């Protein structure tokens, strides 16, 4: 379970921007939560806090009772490697690696050995409908297929949490629905916690629970 308590985050560039203004939030295990809101409202910053990708200025982010805001960088790396699968809007695939190699990359921090790593990666690709595309480079795949590779990379380590930041933002409506069908199917079957950041109401309405972020505050 996640428990965020009075989390704040301010960025200072040419002006001061309050991304999170004292956010308190509980996310139970196994919940599918959608965080919606306009660009600049703080929803991606909130997701980064859940993933330990950024640290708050104040407040606490607890996962299973452990405050990840005070973890060392090495402990945070281990937390992300073991417990989290992260799906980005821009896919974040390595263009010089095949689909299978990109998925295998999710297992490298867990020290899974070569033969087992490849076998699990191929199985994960088959589960997202990409059996037979294991040796294709990202440039040889459509946007929807690339996002499926990214989902397979997130799922292959059997994480407790999936964090998805605008996972359908670069896709057309048909691909959007196919990708969300895939994520929802795996969530129902495997029971992980899933938090999706989106500005798309069609994506948000699929979630068990929906919250809105506006100017760094929840509503």
Image (cartoon, helix red, strand yellow):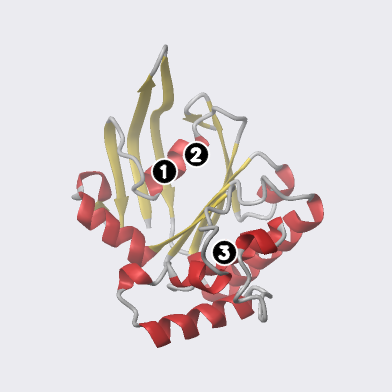
Quadrant containing the N terminus is: bottom left
**Total numbered circles:** 3
Q: Residue furthest top?
A: 15
Could you say where residue 163 lies in the image, as x and y percent from the top left?
49, 54
- Is mark 1 in CB contact (under 8 Å) with mark 2? yes
**Crowding at mark 2 (Cα within 10 Å: few <14, some 14-19, many 20+):** many
Alpha carbon separation for disc pair 1 and 3: 18 Å
Q: Is 73 on the left or on the right of 219, as rendered?
A: left
Residue 12, placed above or below residue 119 = above
Q: Secondary structure at mark 2?
A: helix
Residue depicted at 59% across the width and 71% down the height: 186
The answer to which image quadrant residue 84 occupies is bottom left
Q: Where is mark 2, residue-wise?
A: 44
Image mark for residue 48: 1
Q: Along the line of sight, which residue is nearer the eye, 127 or 145? A: 145
Could you say where residue 23 lies in the image, as x and y percent from the top left?
40, 34
Mark in front: 2 vs 3 = 3
Residue 196, placed above or below residue 126 = above
Q: Along the line of sight, which residue is nearer the eye, 167 or 20? A: 167
Q: Where is mark 3, residue-wise?
A: 151
Q: Is 200 on the left or on the right of 114, as rendered?
A: right
Q: Is 45 on the left or on the right of 182, as rendered?
A: left
Residue depicted at 49% across the width and 32% down the height: 42
Q: Residue furthest right?
A: 174
């Amino acid at each position: 379970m996640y428990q965020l308590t009075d989390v704040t985050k301010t960025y200072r560039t040419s002006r001061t921007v309050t991304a999170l203004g004292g956010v308190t939030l509980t996310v139970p295990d196994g919940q599918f939560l959608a965080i919606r809101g306009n660009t600049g409202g703080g929803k991606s910053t909130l997701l980064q806090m859940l993933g330990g990708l950024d640290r708050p200025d104040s407040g606490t982010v607890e996962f299973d009772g452990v405050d990840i805001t005070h973890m060392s960088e090495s402990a945070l790396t281990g937390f992300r490697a073991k417990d989290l699968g992260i799906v980005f809007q821009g896919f974040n695939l390595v263009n010089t690696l095949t689909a299978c190699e990109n998925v295998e990359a999710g297992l490298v921090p867990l020290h899974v050995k070569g033969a087992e790593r490849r076998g699990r990666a191929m199985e994960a690709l088959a589960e997202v409908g990409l059996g037979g595309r294991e040796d294709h480079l990202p440039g040889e795949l459509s946007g929807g297929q690339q996002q499926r590779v990214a989902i397979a990379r997130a799922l292959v380590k059997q994480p407790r949490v999936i964090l998805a930041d605008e996972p359908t933002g670069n896709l057309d409506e048909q691909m959007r629905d196919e990708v969300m069908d895939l994520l929802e199917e795996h969530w129902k079957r495997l029971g992980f916690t899933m938090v999706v950041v989106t500005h798309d109401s069609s994506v948000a309405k699929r979630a068990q629970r929906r919250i809105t972020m506006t100017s760094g505050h929840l509503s």
